[in-house]
Amino acid sequence: MSIELPETAGVTEQSPEELEALLDELVIGRDDHLNAPGYVIKPDTVVESLRRLRDDAGFDHLSCVTAQEYDDRYESIYHLKKFDDPTQEVSIVVPADKENPVSQSANAVFRTADWHEREAYDLVGIEYDEHPNLKRILLPDTWQGHPLGQSYDQDQPQVVPLREHKNPLLEDQRAASESETMYLNIGPHHPATHGVLHVKAVLDGEQVVDLEPDIGYLHRCEEQMCQNSTYRYQIMPYPDRWDYISAGLLNEWAYARVAEDMADIEVPEYAQVIRTMGAELCRMAAHFLALGTFALDIYGDFTAIFMYSIRDRERVQNILEDLTGQRLMFNYFRLGGVVWDLPEPREEFIENARDYLEELPTALEEYHDMMTANEILQLRTVDTGVLPPEVAKSYGATGPVARGSGIDYDLRRDDPYGYYDKLDWDVVVEDGCDNYSRLLVRMREVEQSAKIVEQCLDLLEDWPEDERTIQANVPRTIKPKDDTEIYRAVEGAKGELGIYIRADGTEKPARFKIRSPCFSNLQTLPEMSNGEYVPDAIASLGSLDIVLGEVDR
Amino acid sequence: MSSDNQQPFVTDRSRVTTDTQDARLTGQDDRFNSRLREAFGSSPFILTKFDKFMNWVRGSSMFMLQFGIACCSIEMMHTYAVKHDLDRFGAGVPRASPRQADVIIIPGTIVSKFAPRMKRVYDQMPEPKFVIGMGSCTISGGPFQEGYNVVKGAEEVIPVDIHIPGCPPRPEALVYGVAKLQERIANGESAPVVVKPYELEQFGDLERDEIVDQLAAEIDTDDLVMRYNWADSP
Ligand code: SF4
């Protein structure tokens, strides 16, 4: 009873030497990371190197771009993977001059580099040559300095002129420009943007001709917070607040995984089962909210679907509260395990959870009756917001967004961690590429999650009493060796949630970079909505299921 | 209404008054003996100040602004929806437009880019308006207080009537906070107004003399600034 592993025979794996031979004259040094070989290249050969790796070696997934400042240089790291086999990784390290940090943009090879590099420019201060639109992305345009750079003075006053925030609709946009188009401002305070997203749309009649998401309204310095906290205890509460739609345990796992791999901590099997169960419960809760708000976006269904989804979330949250002691911000994982065992009496907890799972099929049927079988919803979602797989890959889309476009990519199976590889479940893939497929993927994933939880409950029930180790023996302070670098990802509720850490020999990370799935997924919004009607753009935004805490971090 | 009263409804005026009066006095028909009457005694008039009456009305029917910022908004949604159902307390009608709302719940971390927007939403709400700060973030910046981009509490931007601590506060806590706010409104209390972030404020309490007038003339009122003095923030 274990999940079928994907066909990886077709994906040739290159040895580090082969890759070096492929990059040949471009490589000027090696800087290996724990997870992947790293090649140092010159700042003006980025496009060439990435193109060779993508076209000749099959590294088609630019997972993340990390920028950081050292005492003597700046550095951009491109973390590459393969969609067909994410365990094959390679890092391209691009040092840039300390005085004048300029580096070539990767935008020509991977579209996703656009936002990632803007963020790097905004927070660290590296400038990217040939970048189509290099301006600040998370902070206001008038911001002075680059906050994650070394010389930043956090106490300096910052000024944001009101003109930056003036109402863009004050003047009649059409009359002013004498064009046929109209400017439509959506957000940042708008019920359909799922938080504080700002979308600038240009319309021609009812159709969208240009659409630009403007983010940064919830940029609360998560990376800085983690860099100021100790590995052992202080970082763990923060991941809960990245994707706050009840996906807390999934996020905590991202940090737990990277830190455990870095410090070489072995997690007891029993704890892995509890983690797997908790994480899947979180995924269910997160997907329920996605369903509820999607119905709200599409046909303003506040009374039925939304309430149903909140009802189901409440039930999941009750189970999670029994397990962790918290409704939303769990802080339940510890490095090397979880903080406590299942609540006593165990039988009651297991029975409660089973009860819930038993009633789930009926609930899901209700959702199907009211959503997928609903003609209005079908009219609004089938064949709207189309995202072809190649485009999705180029933007680094992952999670249900990628799986709704027929990309068979799920880190739980492809890069196994926890207990997933010993359980029996399926990866849900739909190849409609439209809003409807993304909705379907989420609904089916809830079923799969329930299947996983059920198996975990069986395992936990029969686990011999004297083998219930919930935590490995982990030292009180963790100080990974100087200059250890690692990038690791898990499958969060929205997709690949990765973390890059560089250690400097102290008990706090020197660089902590979060690769947020929503950040990349949101980038596909203009692709999906240009040329479509405004309501379809709203539907596409809903189907992306972004959470701004994770987009802005 | 007593159902065992056999008399059909009579239109004869002289009889109606005495009948109902009798019925009431003998306890047969207690529809006039409402709780209100108990509270105000036997007088058929309610004597109150109009202000006081308005305050009571305001507190008893509040329109909330549908306003989500961060993690706390998830718990806020739960408070509105089934199980906790804030509507039970006469305060559960979320309005999407600030122009129709009485109360704004601020559920989350405020960062420098969002603060002016929030101020504008607040400004768009009609008077009288009330503000509930939900979560530690609106008190002090919460877990992100040391962040370079985080405004250290909602009070830096707009006046807050009720603070609800917690990260996030449980829905029960939010319900309690709303009930407290209703109590305060009914008693005619609300927060003192603070207008911190605008530069003009620096001249606000100066006496108007030549220099101040000149300085004031130099200010481009179309381009006031939001200034974040991180060092002075709490
Ligand atoms: S108080 Fe806590 S839960 Fe609420 S917004 Fe702030 S960090 Fe999130």
Image (spheres, rainbow, N blue to C red):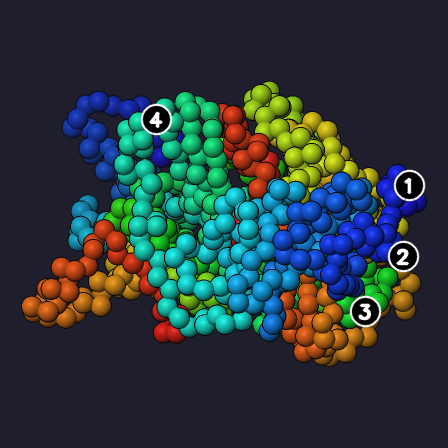
Determine the secondary structure under disc 3: loop
Query: To which quarter of the image does residue A140 belong?
Result: bottom left
**B228 to A249, vertically: above or below:** below
Q: Of the numbered discs in the image, which one, if any, rests on residue A179?
A: 4
- Could you tell me how far apart the alpha carbons at marks 4 and 3 are, in whole angstroms? 62 Å
Q: What residue lies at 53% left-to-right and 63% top-to-bottom?
A: A100
Residue B165 shown left or right of residue A33 in the figure: left
Q: Position of residue B213 (x, y in %)?
A: 10, 64
- Judging from the image, mark 4 belongs to the subunit labelled A
**A543 to A315, vertically: above or below:** above
Determine the secondary structure under disc 4: loop
- In the picture, the quarter occupied by the N terminus of chain A is top right
Mark 4 or mark 1, earlier in chain = 1
Callout 2 amino acid: Asp
Q: Are marks 1 and 3 on the same chain?
A: yes
Q: Position of residue B152 (x, y in %)?
A: 42, 66
Mark 2 or mark 1, earlier in chain = 1
Mark 3 C-beta closer than 8 Å to ligand 1: no
Looking at the rendered image, the disc whose residue lies closer to the viewer, 2 or 1, is 1
Q: What residue lies at 43% left-to-right and 45% top-to-bottom?
A: A188
- Could you tell me how far apart the alpha carbons at marks 4 and 1 are, in whole angstroms? 55 Å
Determine the secondary structure under disc 1: loop
Callout 1 amino acid: Ala
Looking at the rendered image, the disc whose residue lies closer to the viewer, 1 or 3, is 1
Callout 4 amino acid: Ser
Q: Which residue is mark 2?
A: A462
Q: Name the foreground residue: A336 vs A385.
A: A385
Q: Which residue is mark 1?
A: A9
Looking at the rendered image, the disc whose residue lies closer to the viewer, 2 or 4, is 4
* Marks 3 and 2 in Cβ contact (< 8 Å): no
Q: Which residue is mark 3?
A: A265
- In the picture, the quarter occupied by the C terminus of chain A is bottom right
